[in-house]
Image: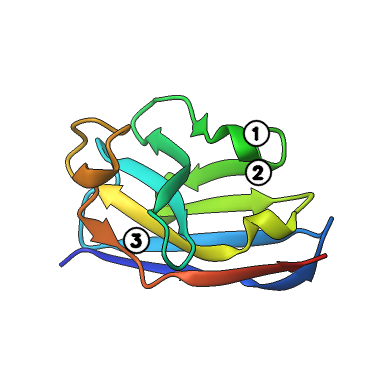
Amino acid sequence: QAQLVESGGGSVQAGGSLRLACVTSGFSFRNTCMGWFRQVAGKKREVVARVYTSGGSVTYADSVKDRFTFSQDDAKATIYLQMDSLEPDDTAMYYCGAQVPAANCAHVSLYHHWGQGTQVTVSA
């Protein structure tokens, strides 16, 4: 059974940094779309960064480009999100998601495996 477990959220002041991790198990890490998403209560879940694990380039939301960095460790079946220069608008619940097998990494609706989420709160 597919499992995704996020960690690393917390509360920081604007300008601070956090590093999220998502450890996966129960499915092949290859030929998979993996992504970081965030959601604020009452709003749709939005993609923050996503990648095709078997060789694609990372796609970032415009709002986080040059501030957030996605990385993956194939040996550990883990993805990371380094978040720098955090802003209050980054406050949200952050989720990692997987689309197994990869069909179209751009379609959020095709991600069927999700972690429990980790809260990120950025104060002004």
Pointer 3: residues within 10 angstroms few (<14), some, or many (20+)? many
Find residue 105 and report its image quarter.
Answer: top left
Q: Which residue is mark 3?
A: 24
Q: Is residue 109 above or below residue 90?
A: above
Pointer 2: residues within 10 angstroms few (<14), some, or many (20+)? many
Find residue 103 and report its image quarter.
Answer: top left
Q: Is residue 100 above or below residue 23?
A: above
Tag 1, which secondary structure?
A: loop
Q: Measure the C-alpha gap from mark 1 to mark 2.
A: 6 Å
| x then y, percent, for residue 83 | 68, 52
The numbered disc on residue 65 is 1
The C terminus lies in quadrant? bottom right
The N terminus lies in quadrant? bottom left
Check if mark 1's residue and mark 3's residue have beta carbons within 8 Å: no
| x then y, percent, for residue 81 | 58, 51
| x then y, percent, for residue 87 | 75, 54
Q: Which residue is mark 2?
A: 68
Q: Which is more toward the observer, 7 or 60? A: 60
Q: Measure the C-alpha gap from mark 3 to mark 2.
A: 21 Å
Is 57 positioned to the left or the right of 121 in the image?
Answer: left
